[in-house]
Image (cartoon, helix red, strand yellow):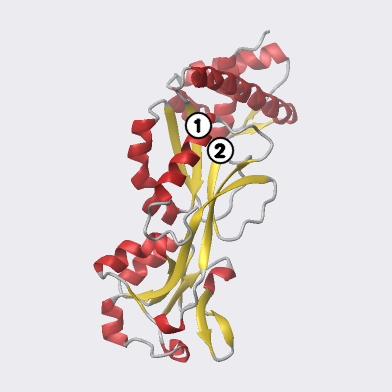
């Protein structure tokens, strides 16, 4: 075999990080060493994999084709190493987890310390995105999805559910007054999401039926941003219990229109590739999440 794993690692890391300099920092090597590794790889394959412009590196057509093969080879080696670790009863390897920023901050981050103590050989890599990502494109092992699942190409494990409530800060209610009914929302500052529109459907019963589509006065793409705005007294907001339970407990936010609020819960799932065997590091994380989320008081549907 002409090509070495170090050369494959250098190539894929340059592509993923966007530059030789960034790849050298990530791999703990010199930029010249990474550049030489790419050069050796191209010489062995007798093709140009990366086209170097004045501003960036671009994959050639041959580079695109080789990248997919390189990823498979590295993944196979990682899987083989992990199988050996399993034999030693010590799951290991990098675990890439993605979640929306509110869930990451309020639910996952507090659990990281305990997980690392239990599984010290698993290298966690945490990513946040407020939009649904493609797990393969983003090289993600596991993602947390809140709401109805749509992608049937993924395995999913139910972790529970979180109730939606309409909330406001005491300062806002003191200044503007609490709405006595749903109709009075028209005179209030409403905090809502830029997208998707479904997140601006509030679980309120009104004269024309169940569920109220609101037009936000102030919009944000992140639920955490909306939470902070509500705490700052900027208006009424509809958010999930997993991110506001502590605020309600300490009085930072209070529920409004409780009598008109429907019992609507957002399902929470962990999703992962359907076409691969469940890696031990993923299984460990899933079991750990299931164990700890089942004990959370905000979890309305404990698995």
Q: CA distance from mark 1 to mark 2?
A: 10 Å
Q: Nearer the viewer, residue 139 or 2?
A: 139
Q: Secondary structure at mark 1?
A: helix
Crowding around mark 2 (Cα neighbors within 10 Å: few <14, some 14 to 19, many 20+) is: many
Q: Secondary structure at mark 2?
A: loop
**C-beta proximity under 8 Å, tags 1 and 2:** yes
Q: Is residue 79 above or below residue 301?
A: above
Residue at figure coordinates x 58%, y 41% from the top left: 138
Q: Quadrant of the N terminus?
A: top right
| Comes first in the chain, label 1 or label 2 | 2
Residue 88 screen position, x and y as percent = 47, 17
Count the marks. 2
In the rendered view, does 141 fall on the left or right side of 91? right
Q: Nearer the viewer, residue 267 or 254?
A: 267
Residue 208 screen position, x and y as percent = 59, 89
Crowding around mark 1 (Cα neighbors within 10 Å: few <14, some 14 to 19, many 20+) is: many
Residue 279 screen position, x and y as percent = 56, 31
Question: Which tag is nearer the camera, tag 1 or tag 2?
Answer: 1
Q: Which mark is residue 20?
A: none
| Residue labelled with disc 1 | 281
Residue 114 screen position, x and y as percent = 34, 38
Residue at figure coordinates x 46%, y 21% from the top left: 89
Q: Nearer the viewer, residue 18 or 53?
A: 18
In the rendered view, does 15 fall on the left or right side of 60? left
Residue 18 in sight here: no
Q: Is residue 271 above or below residue 283?
A: below
In the rendered view, does 198 fall on the left or right side of 247? right
In the rendered view, does 162 fall on the left or right side of 136? left
Residue 67 in sight here: yes
Q: Is residue 161 above or below residue 186?
A: above
Q: Which mark is residue 141?
A: 2
């Amino acid at each position: 075999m002409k090509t070495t794993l170090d050369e494959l690692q250098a190539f894929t890391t340059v592509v993923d990080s966007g530059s030789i300099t960034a790849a050298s920092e990530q791999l703990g090597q010199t930029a010249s060493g990474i550049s030489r590794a790419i050069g050796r790889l191209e010489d062995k394959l007798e093709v140009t994999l990366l086209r170097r412009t004045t501003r960036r590196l671009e994959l050639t057509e041959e580079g695109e084709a080789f990248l997919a093969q390189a990823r498979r080879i590295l993944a196979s080696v990682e899987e083989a190493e992990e199988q050996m670790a399993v034999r030693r009863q010590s799951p290991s390897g990098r675990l890439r987890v993605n979640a929306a920023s509110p869930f990451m901050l309020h639910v996952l981050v507090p659990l990281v310390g305990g997980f690392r103590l239990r599984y010290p050989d698993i290298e966690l890599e945490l990513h946040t995105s407020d939009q649904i990502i493609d797990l393969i494109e983003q090289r993600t092992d596991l993602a947390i999805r809140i709401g109805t699942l749509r992608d049937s190409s993924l395995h999913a494990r139910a972790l529970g559910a979180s109730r939606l409530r309409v909330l406001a800060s005491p300062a806002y209610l003191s200044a503007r007054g609490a709405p006595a009914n749903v109709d009075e929302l028209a005179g209030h500052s409403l905090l809502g999401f830029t997208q998707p529109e479904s997140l601006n459907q509030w679980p309120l019963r009104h004269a024309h039926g169940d569920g109220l589509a609101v037009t936000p006065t102030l919009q944000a793409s992140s639920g955490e941003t909306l939470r902070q705005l509500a705490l700052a007294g900027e208006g009424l907001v509809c958010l999930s219990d997993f991110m506001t339970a502590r605020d309600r407990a300490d009085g930072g936010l209070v529920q409004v229109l409780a009598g008109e609020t429907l019992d609507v819960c957002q399902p929470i799932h962990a999703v992962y590739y359907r076409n691969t065997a469940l890696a031990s590091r993923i299984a460990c994380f899933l079991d750990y999440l299931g164990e700890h989320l089942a004990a959370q008081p905000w979890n309305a549907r404990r698995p």
